[in-house]
Amino acid sequence: MDSQSSYDSMMGGMASEETRATTSTAAPVRRRDSAAPEPAKTPSTRAWPLPLLVAGIVLTALNLRPAITSLGALLEEVRDGLGMSGSAAGLLTSVPPLCFAAFGVMAPRLARRFGPAAVVCAGMVAIAVGLAIRPYAGGTAGFLAGSALALMGIAVSNVLMPVVVKRWFPDRVGSMTGLYSMALALGTASAAAVTVPMTKALGGHWQAGLAVWAGLAATAVVPWIPFLRARGTLAPAPAATARASDGLRVARSRTAWALAVFFGLQATAAYITMGWMAQIFRDAGVPAGRAGLLLAVTMVMGVPLAFVIPRLASRLPHQGPIVVALSVCGLLGYAGLYVAPAGGAWAWALLLGVANCAFPLALTMVGMRARTGAGVAELSAFAQSTGYLISIPGPLLVGVLYQHSGGWGLPLALMAGLMIPQIAAGVLAGRDRVVEDEATR
C-alpha cells in the first residue's frame, strides 16, 4: 500500500530528517548573529516517538470536517427543529468560513507563545465541547454558538497542520500533506455517510446524531498530551522564529494573494457542496439516506486523490495544469446537477469529489511557496484567513437564491461562474516562486 510504504520510509529516515530540520532553522540564525547565546537545548526528538506525532496529525485531520458534513446530512431536520428559513440556513452554512477567517489568523501568534502542540490540543478540546453542546443549546443562537466554538478549534488546527509538516518533514511535504489530507477526506466522508443511519439507530433524534461526533474529537486530544511540555520539539526556538520572519510582509506578495484567492474560491465551492449538495439531491426526489451517501461519495473521492495530488504537485515546477483539470471536473459536475440531478447523481457526485481535491492542492502549495517554517506559518495564516473571508458570502448567497428563485438553476450558475476566477488564481499561485523573495522588506 502506497501510504504504508510512505509511512515506513518516514520511520526509517527519522534521524536524517531531524538533522535536516535542525540545520534549516538553527544554523542560519547562528550565522546571522554569531554573538547571540546558544538557545536552550530542547528534549531530544527521539524521546518523542514519531508514530505518536503521526497519529496526532491523522486524528486531528479526521476531526477537521465532521462538524460541517454531519450538519449538511441533517440540514433539513435541523431547519425544521429550529424553525430556520432558507436564508437562515444559508447563514448557518456560512459560519464555518467566517470562523476560520476570524480565528485562523490567531494561530501563528498562539503557536509562538504556547507551542503548536498545545494549540492543536486545545483546538481538539474546543471541537469536542462545541459538538457536544450545540444540539442541546436551545434555539438557533445557541446552535450557532456551539458551532462557533467547534469551528474555532478547527480554524487554528487548519493553519498549524502545514506548519507542523514543514517543521518535521521538510523533505516530505507532499507525502505528509497527502497523508493528513487523506485523513481529512476520510473524516469528511464518514460524517456524511453515517450521520443519517446513525441518527436513526439512536432513536431518530437529530441532536444525538450530531452530538456523537464529539467522541471522535475527544479521542484526538490524547496523542498531543505528551508533547504539551515540549514546545521546542514542535517549533523553532522563539528567537529563531522572530529572526526568520523579520521583515516578512506576506500581504506584499502577489503569490500570497493569488494563493489566498484560490484558497477562498475552492473553499466556497467546498462549503456550498458540503452544506447544500444533499439538499439538491433530496429536492430532485432522491431519498434522504441515498442523498447522504452521495455526499459521502463526493467526500470520499478525496481519500485516494488527497494522497496522490500533493505528491504529484510537489514534483511539478508549476501546479497550474492540476488546477485546470480539477476545475473542469467541477464545471461538468455543476452542469450535470442542472440537467439531470437524479438521473446522473453518481457521476455528478464523483466529478464534484474530484473538484474538491483543490483543497489538498492548496495546502501543498502553501508548503511549497515559502522557504522557511516561519514563512509557512505566516503564509498559511494569511492564505487561509483571507481565503475563508472570501468564501463567506458564497453559501449564504446560495441559500438566498434558492429561497427566492424556488429552484437550483441560479445557485448552480453561481457555482459554475466562480470556477473561472478560481482557475486564474490557481494558475498564478502555482508558479515556481516563494513569498520570501516577494514580501521581504
Image: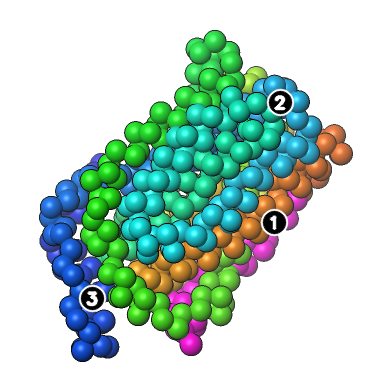
What residue is at 44 percent from the left and 77 percent from the top? 434
Mark 2 in CB contact with mark 1 (< 8 angstroms): no
- Residue in the picture at 78% in, 39% down: 87
Q: Specify the segment rendered in magenta.
A: 414-441
Residue 26 — which label?
Answer: 3
Residue closer to the observer: 13 or 284: 13
Mark 2 or mark 1, earlier in chain = 2
Question: Magenta segment, principal secondary structure?
Answer: helix
User: What secondary structure is marked by label 2?
Assistant: helix
Q: Position of residue 307 (x, y in %)?
A: 37, 49
Q: Amino acid at mark 1?
A: Leu
Location of residue 238 in the rendering, given as x and y in whole percent from the top left corner: 31, 70
> Which coloring applies here?
rainbow
Q: Is residue 49 left or right of residue 61?
A: left
- The quadrant in which residue 102 appears is bottom right
> In the rendered structure, which disc, 2 or 3, sits on the residue that comes first in sequence?
3
Separation of disc 1 and disc 3 at Cα?
Answer: 43 Å
How packed is label 1: few (under 14 Cα within 10 Å), some, or many (20 or more)?
A: some
Image height of 396 relative to 284, above or below:
below
Query: Which residue is under mark 1?
Result: 418
Report x, y in % for residue 295: 57, 33
Please name whichever residue, 240 or 348, is drawn nearer the observer in this view of the structure.
Answer: 240
Q: Which mark is residue 384?
A: none
> What residue do we see at 18% from left, 63% from top?
42
**Residue on which the image places disc 2:** 82
For residue 436: magenta?
yes
> Which quadrant: the N terminus?
top left
